[in-house]
């Protein structure tokens, strides 16, 4: 009866360039799932990704070109002035 741990990262890219990230930590006893915890957070275009999963960093590097970052910042500034 050995406990094992599995970490899973799932992410979704939104239309405005934000990346939603859900991390799951799963604990198994042999093959039976006995516990699971979740952590969710969102990265906005231009955010620091150095602490993220390599796949998340790769997607952000491809997606977050200067025009995407500026468009996101402009939309946020416009939303704050309303």
Image (cartoon, helix red, strand yellow):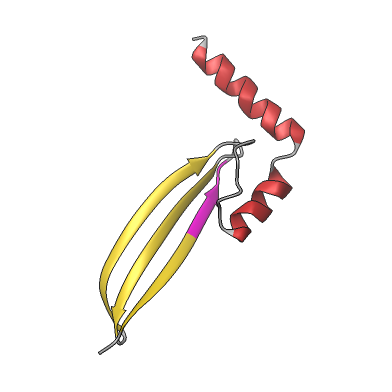
In the image, is 27 to the left or to the right of 43? left
Residue at 31% from the left image edge and 85% from the top image edge:
31
Residue at 64% from the left image edge and 52% from the top image edge:
57
Magenta residues span 10-14
- Of the 4 image quadrants, the one containing the N terminus is bottom left
Relative image position of residue 54 (x, y in whole percent):
62, 59
Relative image position of residue 80 (x, y in whole percent):
50, 14
Relative image position of residue 77 (x, y in whole percent):
58, 17
> Residue 36: within the magenta?
no
Residue at 51% from the left image edge and 54% from the top image edge:
11
Residue at 62% from the left image edge and 28% from the top image edge:
72
Q: Quadrant of residue 67?
A: top right
Relative image position of residue 64 (x, y in whole percent):
69, 41
Q: Quadrant of residue 32?
A: bottom left
Q: Is residue 45 above or below residue 11?
A: above
Q: Is residue 64 above or below residue 74?
A: below
Q: Quadrant of residue 47?
A: top right
In the image, is 82 to the left or to the right of 65? left
- The residue most toward the top is 81
Q: Main secondary structure of the magenta part?
A: strand
């Amino acid at each position: 009866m050995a406990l094992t741990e599995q970490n899973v990262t799932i992410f979704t890219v939104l239309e405005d360039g934000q990346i939603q990230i859900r991390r799951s930590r799963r604990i198994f006893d042999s093959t039976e799932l006995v516990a699971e915890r979740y952590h969710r957070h969102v990265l906005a275009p231009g955010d620091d990704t150095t602490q993220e999963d390599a796949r998340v960093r790769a997607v952000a590097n491809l997606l977050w070109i200067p025009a995407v970052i500026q468009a996101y910042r402009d939309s946020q500034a416009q939303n704050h002035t309303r």
